[in-house]
Image (tube, helix red, strand yellow):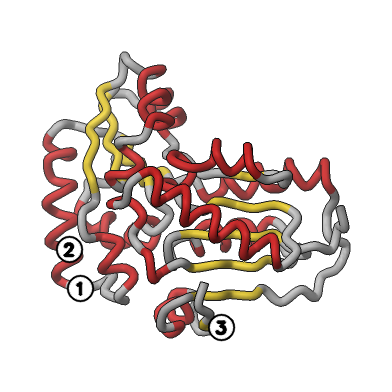
Amino acid sequence: MDNKQPIGIFDSGIGGTSIWKEIHHLLPNEKTIYLADSKNAPYGEKSKEEIIRLSMKNTDFLLDMGCKLIVVACNTATTNAIRELRAKYNVPFIGIEPAIKPAAINSKTQIIGILATKGTLNSELFNKTTEIFFETKIIEQIGYGLVELIENGQIDSPEMEQLLRSYLNPMIEANIDFLVLGCSHYPYLIPQIRKIIPDHIQIIDSGLAVARQTQNVLKEIGFNPDNNNEPIFYTNTNPKVLENILGGEYIVQEKDF
């Protein structure tokens, strides 16, 4: 394994950049290639078989680019496909799962909320995780329409606020004290969510935990010693939305895959 090989990161669109930012901040020397499969977003409404197929397609692309490890920066892809990915490919995979554990352990009310996609909430892996914390009441809410609005650049739209209020108000009424964001797109909604939920409700996402796990894996396979690695971004739709979410700092290449 060449230390200078890049880290590959894929998601069903632009949301996984919330994970990429944590990885890039923690490991600035590492070259990264980010793949936004926005053409097929959201994964959360697709069948398990289709999610596995798309995840393998993305993995093949990143391995062809010489990546030394793959970060599955998508909760739906992780919970539905990572077992199959690890079985097929001889490369380390790092997944992202909803951070139920820290929320359940630290909850004072023993009531927590999770906002996630249908594909994540219905997955076998997610249900096995929630079974462990049976003493905690977990209020699950599918975030219908949220990913589509984010992918269309409508984070601050009235439609987004209306959807978020309809999803979050029942959780507030149920007395949750933790809100778990179970989709890598959703951290971009934190400013809007904060306007709706009371201050005492803590929001948890998995970005930093994924970055730390990436760091742990690199201890075994080798860090990149260089510090002049410009990240590469690919999307299979209009690159402007991804460029905007990255603050206009990077050029995004449009590529059909």
Q: How many marks?
A: 3
Q: In the image, is 32 to the left or to the right of 135?
A: right
- Labels 2 & 3 near each other (Cβ < 8 A): no
Residue occupied by mark 2: 161
Q: Residue at x 36, y 35 (%)?
A: 123
| Residue 152 vertical placement versus 172 (above, below) | below
Q: In the image, is 133 to the left or to the right of 218?
A: left
Q: CA distance from mark 2 to mark 1?
A: 7 Å
- Residue type beneath disc 1: Ser
Q: Give x and y (percent) for residue 15.
A: 43, 62
- Labels 2 & 1 near each other (Cβ < 8 A): yes
> Which comes sooner in the sequence, label 1 or label 3?
1
Q: Give x and y (percent) for residue 163.
A: 15, 58
Q: Residue at x 78, y 64 (%)?
A: 29
Residue occupied by mark 1: 157
- Residue type beneath disc 3: Gln
Q: Residues within 10 Å of mark 2 (few under 14, many from 20)?
A: some
Q: CA distance from mark 1 to mark 3?
A: 27 Å
Residue occupied by mark 3: 253
Q: Nearer the viewer, residue 54 or 98?
A: 54
